[in-house]
Amino acid sequence: MSVGLLALLDDVAGLVKVAAASLDDIAGQAAKAGVKAAGAVIDDAAVTPNYVHGFSADRELPIIGRIALGSIKNKLLFLLPAALLLSFFAPWAITPLLMIGGAYLCYEGAEKVFHAIMPHQAEAHEAVLEPAAVNPQSLEDEKVAGAIKTDFILSAEIMTIALAAIPVESVFYQAVVLALVGIGITIAVYGAVALIVKADDFGLFMAKHGRTGPGRAFGRGVVTGMPGFMKVLSLVGTAAMTWVGGSIVAHGLYEFGWDLPEHIIEGAAHWAELTFAPIAGFAGWFATAFVDFFFGLLLGALLIPVASHVITPLWRALKRLHPKASPKPAA
């Protein structure tokens, strides 16, 4: 019996080693896939703080929490199974769906630029799309819903990039790696966003309660610098949204045979790398992002009147065809 027990324990130890190796492999693949999607992750982190701008300090973290929960739902409940199903049954549909999402990001980015340049006309356009919120809770719900929509598109890109980086072993293996990527990236992005939006509160605390002169000076510097930093981050977020959308659409057009936008982007990157050889890597990236941004901004600007005069009337007509049931009168 003792020999049998030792053999059993040896088999269990072998299984544990195999399981540990599998977990290490899964964790390693998740890390690699996450790195592949780093560009979209940075864009996500830059875009999100815009959605808490203008709210009281006590509502900032709850709003971020609501958006983060929506992001987890986006990734695990919708995008993960959709990515696996599409990659298995309809891989041809992934590119068109991503292009639709990219076009939406271009529209969102162009609308923000439009609002900055011509605020009165932009407000009129927004009023056509949807009535303005009349109370703080409605405004918060509206902002959270908008953030979750944008997160859905960025998360779709992240999950697609991650899926492409995972070796095809089994559906279960891919699902576990994608789930780890989704959870890890969400924690990283919204943890960073929470730190960013609460930095001014931390600075104020340090300025008032710091034990040393340099500590109090640091706190005052954070308080003084955060408004400018948030403005810069808002600009980066808008630019990121637009260049990611432009990149998705340009790459999709290339896959469908129209390669002019992709060739222009590649040509700009090559020229920048040759012109600024000492910083060739950064120069190529910047040129690519700039042309992607310009292309996305142009596409988004074209979509603004389409949203006002075509998509919104059609959506309202569909809603009228299926009105919500009115509540029954009380007995």
Image: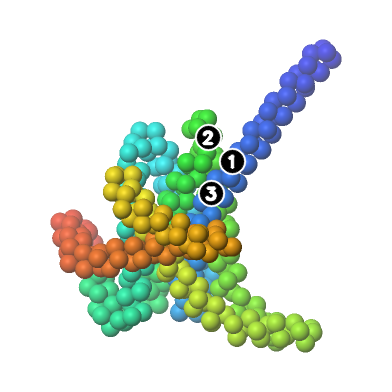
Q: Residue at x 59, y 82 (%)?
A: 225
Q: Secondary structure at mark 1?
A: helix
Q: How is the image coloured?
A: rainbow
Q: Is residue 165 above or below residue 146?
A: above
Q: Amino acid at mark 2?
A: Pro
In primary-sequence order, the first of circles 3 and 1 is: 1
Q: Considering depth in this image, is 46 or 144 the residue closer to the camera?
A: 46
Q: Position of residue 276 (x, y in %)?
A: 53, 64
Q: CA distance from mark 3 to mark 1?
A: 11 Å
- Which residue was labeled with disc 1? 29
Q: CA distance from mark 1 to mark 2?
A: 8 Å
- Give me the disc on residue 36: 3
- Which residue was labeled with disc 2? 167
Image quadrant of residue 249? bottom left
Q: Are marks 3 and 1 in contact (CB under 8 Å)?
A: no
Q: Amino acid at mark 1?
A: Gln
Image quadrant of residue 189? bottom right
Q: Which mark is in front, 3 or 1?
A: 3
Q: Residue at x 45, y 73 (%)?
A: 235
In primary-sequence order, the first of circles 1 and 2 is: 1
